[in-house]
């Protein structure tokens, strides 16, 4: 099974910070066996690709448009990302669903476009606080998976990296417990199994939501937790490198 640590920089950094952070990660001491991905803001993609060249660090976008080109003011297509040397893309992050009305149908189209172009899609799902408090978290995540992935070609689903990110844990300092993460990851794998059978065993499922060096050791223990999608703790090379080292150790 792959182990993956992905850093989602969101709308943070300026050009100089982005390059310095990328260099810190690319040149830092990294344990073998962990795939490392960094996702800077769009304007810094090219500079970060250059900073990561030859290091094995894959650069991801945080969003994309499903159409290859057209009259979509303000959007960025998958071929444009590929042209820059971008190798992966986060899709369906809860902040995009919440603030930009991204629907499961739009998410599905983006996943298809990325797969077609050979970029690694990182598909995000996760329940909100009220849904967790009322015990509906499995229903909600199950519905997200069904809506976004249910109609896709099996090959697209087989090629995904999934990120489970409970919305109540994102940027709040309130991470899911290791038990909550593992049980949801196992559920996600079971649901993926309905779509792609045994191949679901090979789909990496990352945990995201206030994951940091102090709790990662615990969170990464779960057999169905294959790494992390990291926000805040990825904005400093030192803590991101620590997370990579923890993942390498726990998953060895
Ligand atoms: P966080 O963000 O680690 O800052 O909680 C995770 C994410 O939104 O990907």
Image (cartoon, rainbow, N blue to C red):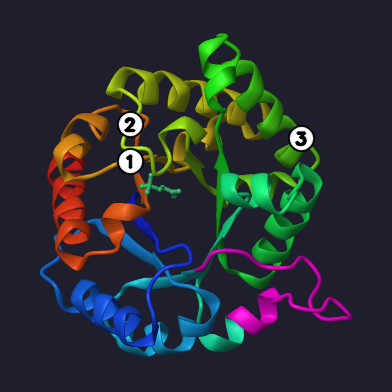
* Secondary structure mainly formed by the magenta segment: loop
Q: Do the residues labelled 1 and 2 touch (CB within 8 Å)?
A: yes
Judge: label 2 CB < 8 Å from ligand 1: yes
State the residue in front, 148 or 203.
Answer: 148
| 3D distance between C-alphas at marks 1 and 2 | 5 Å
Residue 140 rendering spot, x and y as whole percentages:
65, 23
Residue position marked by numbered label 2 in the rendering: 175
Name the quarter where the N terminus is drawn.
Answer: top left
Q: Is mark 3 within 8 Å of ligand 1?
A: no
Q: Is residue 83 visible?
A: yes
Describe the element under mark 2 as helix, strand or loop: loop
Q: Where is residue 215 in the image (x, y as percent from the top left)?
A: 20, 35
Residue position for label 1 = 210
Q: Which quarter of the figure has residue 154?
A: top right
Residue at figure coordinates x 60%, y 69% from the top left: 118
Which of the two marks, 3 or 2, is nearer to us in this view? Answer: 2
Q: Which of marks 3 and 2 is nearer the N terminus?
A: 3
Q: What element carries label 1?
A: loop
User: Looking at the picture, how far across and down is residue 70, in whole percent?
Assistant: 87, 81
First in sequence: mark 3 vs mark 1:
3
Queried on whether the Cβ of the residue with tag 1 lies below 8 angstroms from ligand 1, the answer reads yes
Provide the residue span drawn in magenta: 61-81
């Amino acid at each position: 099974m792959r182990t993956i640590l992905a850093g989602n920089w969101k709308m943070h950094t300026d050009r100089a910070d982005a390059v310095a952070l990328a260099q810190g990660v690319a040149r830092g001491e990294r344990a073998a066996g962990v795939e490392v991905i960094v996702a800077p803001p769009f304007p810094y993609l090219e500079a970060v690709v250059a900073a990561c060249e030859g290091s094995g660090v894959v650069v991801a976008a945080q969003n994309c448009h499903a159409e290859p080109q057209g009259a979509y003011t303000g959007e960025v297509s998958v071929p444009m990302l590929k042209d820059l040397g971008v190798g992966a893309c986060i899709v369906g992050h809860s902040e995009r669903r919440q603030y930009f009305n991204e629907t499961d149908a739009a998410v599905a189209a983006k996943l298809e476009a990325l797969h077609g172009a050979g970029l690694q899609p990182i598909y995000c799902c996760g329940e909100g606080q009220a849904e967790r408090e009322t015990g509906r978290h499995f229903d909600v995540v199950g519905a997200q998976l069904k809506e976004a992935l249910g109609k896709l070609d099996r090959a697209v689903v087989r090629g995904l990296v999934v990120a489970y990110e409970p919305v109540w844990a994102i940027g709040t300092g309130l991470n899911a417990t290791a038990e909550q993460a593992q049980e949801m990851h196992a559920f996600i794998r079971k649901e993926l199994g309905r779509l792609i059978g045994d191949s679901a065993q090979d789909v990496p499922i990352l945990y995201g939501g206030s994951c940091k060096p102090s709790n990662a050791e615990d969170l990464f223990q779960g057999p169905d937790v294959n790494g992390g999608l990291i926000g805040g703790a990825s904005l400093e090379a030192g803590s991101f490198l620590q997370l990579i080292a923890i993942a390498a150790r726990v998953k060895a």
